[in-house]
Amino acid sequence: MTNGDNGTRIMNELFYSVSNLLNWSEFPVEERQVQEIPVSFKNAYYGTYLLVEEEDLVTLLDTKSLKIENRDQEMYMTYGGFIKSIKLFHDIEEENDDVFFTLTGHEFTLSEDKNGTKTVTFYGRKYIKTD
């Protein structure tokens, strides 16, 4: 009974909980230690991002924009019509400071080029900050 907007969140949580309980080696539970994302970093990346078009790009999700928003002093990403908002985390042990993740298993990068343009790369698609 997960026919709501974010049903996959609860489905994934249940699936990985059962996997952990039954020691399914095919679906190991990945534990990560997270670190606080600095406020200055959050403030710099809040905003709307538009897709940079690339030829022959096939993805599961088809949307032209995403948003990174402030919700209770935390970073949330809104993407597409069915992922309403997902909280962003940063792994303490991650070698690349630009890589972030969500509890639903999505990984993406937040980066800034030498001209100060901020981008998000998600599912192989690059989005550029517009505001």
Image (spheres, helix red, strand yellow):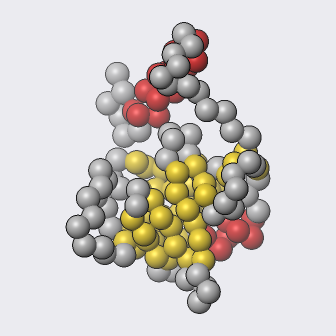
Q: Residue at x 65, y 74 (%)?
A: 44
Residue 10 visible, this angle: no
Instruction: Locate residue 11: give its quadrant.
Output: top left
Residue 38 lies left or right of residue 121; in this view the side is right
Q: Nearer the viewer, residue 31 or 95?
A: 95
Q: Is residue 5 above or below residue 116?
A: above
Residue 114 lies left or right of residue 123; in this view the side is right
Residue 24's spot in the image, x, y percent?
A: 51, 16
Instruction: Locate residue 111: give its quadrant.
Output: bottom right
Q: Is residue 97 above or below residue 29?
A: below
Q: Residue at x 58, y 27 (%)?
A: 29
Residue 104's spot in the image, x, y percent?
A: 50, 39
Residue 111 lies left or right of residue 34; in this view the side is left
Residue 19's spot in the image, x, y percent?
A: 52, 18
Location of the N terminus (image quadrant): top left
Q: Nearer the viewer, residue 16 or 129?
A: 16
